Amino acid sequence: MSVAELLALCLALVVGTLVGWVLSRRRGRPATPPAAPPDEAPPTDEASRLRREWKLAHEEKDRAIAGETLCRRIIDTTLDGVAVLDGDCRIERWNPQAAAIFGWDKDEAIGKPLLPLIVAEKSRAELQRVISGRARLSDTPLFSRRNEMLGRRKNGQEFPLEIAVTPLLQPEKGVSYSVFLRDISERKRVERLKNEFVSTVSHELRTPLTAIRGSLRLIAGGFTGELPAKTRTMINIANESCERLVTLVNDILDVEKIESGKVAFNLRLHDAGELAGKAVDATRAFAQPFGVEIRAEAPSGPCLAMMDADRIIQVMTNLISNAVKFSPKGECIRVRVTPRGGRVRVEVADRGPGIPEDFRPRVFQKFAQADASNDRCSQPGTGLGLSICKAIVERLGGSIGFDTAAGRGTTFWFEIPAEELPPAPDEPASSVLIVEDDPASAELIAAGCRSTSMKAEVASTASAARARLSKGSFAALILDLEMSDVSGFSFLREIRADARLRSLPVIVVTTRREDTGRFPAGDDLSSIVDWIQKPIDGSQVQSALRNIAAAGRDPRAGEGPGDAVRNYLRRATAAAAPR
Amino acid sequence: MGTTAENRVLYVEDEANIRAVGLFSLADVGGLTVEPAQSGPEALEKVEAFRPDLILLDVMMPGMDGISTFRALRGREATSRVPVIFMTAKVQPHEVQGYKDLGAIAVIAKPFDPITLADEVRTLAGWQHCP
């Protein structure tokens, strides 16, 4: 071979190697080293360069393989389950911990869609939402968040599962996901034990507290005789401190019960604006000595939501009294309820000093209290109020938060899912029959009906009512139980005996228990769905009618008003029975 | 339904201190005629002789608890219709409903307010209040 030919060969080899090297770098695969140059090649500069390139490429490949091996070893030995998914949520990688948690080994998992393999039916929609939510964030820096769901093993066993999903950006491959999986059964068990302990301790505390509180109140109230001045002072101190202790124990138990889901909420359709009005009324007296005014802004439209009225008023009252405590004298607090895109939003805004920067992350924690020097109330609260509010709002499917600016004030807000107003039915049966012999009451009830856009017809005697019922069809019957010509109960029995009318929802109107002597015992009262008490007030009628519409549609109405009425009447009939 | 003659209360509470406070509250502050009992069995012994118009029954008692005592009372002809109010720290709405479904007329929460206890009892029982 001539020198020229040899040079050409070396050049070709070098160029070829370089090209191959560059190409394989771009593809991310370790470079495949070219075949070793023939030993017979004379040791020229080009040959040394070739050897160097070849050595570098080999080292590159070794590093890449070592890197991949290390990575896999780390993933395989993590304490958490790890899965890697492709853009369609199919499993590409599945580590031994994931296999241990779920019972699916690698061969059973790879290539399968993740969702049916790891979560119970009821959590699938939520997990899908989490993953889709992450995909939309693929333009932003990577982050992951833990979600708790109901997991399910291969053998069908369900257990509490914690999942963290992180989108992975691989330019050539598009979006894929790494999923960290943790079986948190043990953690949940320990939490439950802790909560039960807290609950037991608090119950034990209540017994001596009942006696202490009782005796102190009696003494301080003067019921055991006149007290010398110094004794009076000391007793008052003890009494006040005892009240705080009782409130504290109650709050601790309250929080634990709500957070552990043991509280049964009495969910009914309510207007948040009305409830806010009640909360404001309840706190006005509290605000007065602080010289703070509370202003409730009327909502722009109906703000209906399924909620437990007492608990929501509890939340609102808590937020308002906090605002009062931190408001300067002469300022005013604004309470606003607005519908906001499928949710009802309640805001309590004050013009106080704002929440200090370093306290903001702890606002909703238990027993966290900011610098008390700003708190104008002489007795600091239990430190649990906001954590209770958060627990309640979150159990109702909502969220809670605040906006604050130093020196300008703070607005606490919470939002809960709204309910649509039941559409005014335009079929013929959008009328309510009112059976009431007192014209004034009848008119009040009729006005209440009309305000829910239902038509109202009035019958003032049982026979007129029978005639109307046979001629038309009604969405509901409002029946006065105390009419003079016929007992409401016998009329009810008639209706129930009539197959056509048996399922007509009935709202009963009555006064107080004094008339229970007239209630017959043991009636089947199941058509009664609600109860309006005289004196009639339009909002009772509205809410009763709305509840009929809501209960008809939504099984979440839970313990319905009908149950309350039935039990009340059952008890009343038992009490009225002759001794 | 209320007449001025109704004011006899059988008060069943196992904790001595609470019972003393309750007794003072119902009788001295509230003007009711009260007979205390410290357990379910003692209540059952005393009830027929005392002829209460109402029974205030603590739920958490060792041995025979409030519910069992209630059932025993209901099981006896002479006492089956005496109205009962339970006293308990457990006052979630669904728990209260549970007691009412059993047949109690009401539930009073503990810790109770000794100053207003008698008034509360009168209201719940539908008795007339003292002027």
Image: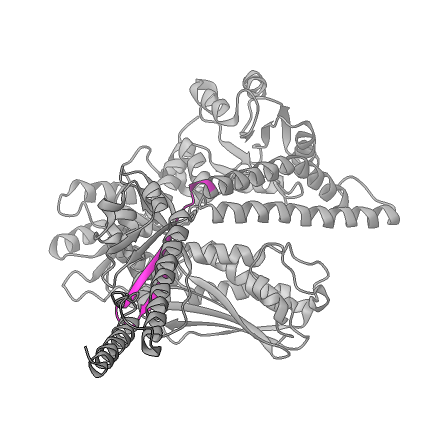
Q: Please state the horizontal and vertical placement of residue A510, each as a whole percent of the image.
A: 37, 49
Q: Residue shown at 38%/62% (left/top)?
A: A63
Displayed quadrant of residue A171: bottom left
Please state the extent of the stretch shown in magenta in the rendering: A164-186
Reply above or below: B33 against A3: above
Q: Quadrant of the C terminus of chain A?
A: top left
Any magenta on residue A190? Answer: no
Displayed quadrant of residue A365: bottom right
Q: Is residue A508 visible?
A: no
Q: Please state the horizontal and vertical placement of residue A484, each as a whole percent of the image.
A: 31, 48
Quick one: which residue is furthest to the bottom in this view? A4
Q: Nearer the viewer, residue A76 or A545?
A: A76
Q: Residue shown at 18%/57% (left/top)?
A: A474
Secondary structure, magenta segment, majority class: strand
Q: Is residue B79 left or right of residue A365?
A: left
Q: Please state the horizontal and vertical placement of residue A215, each as a whole percent of the image.
A: 72, 39
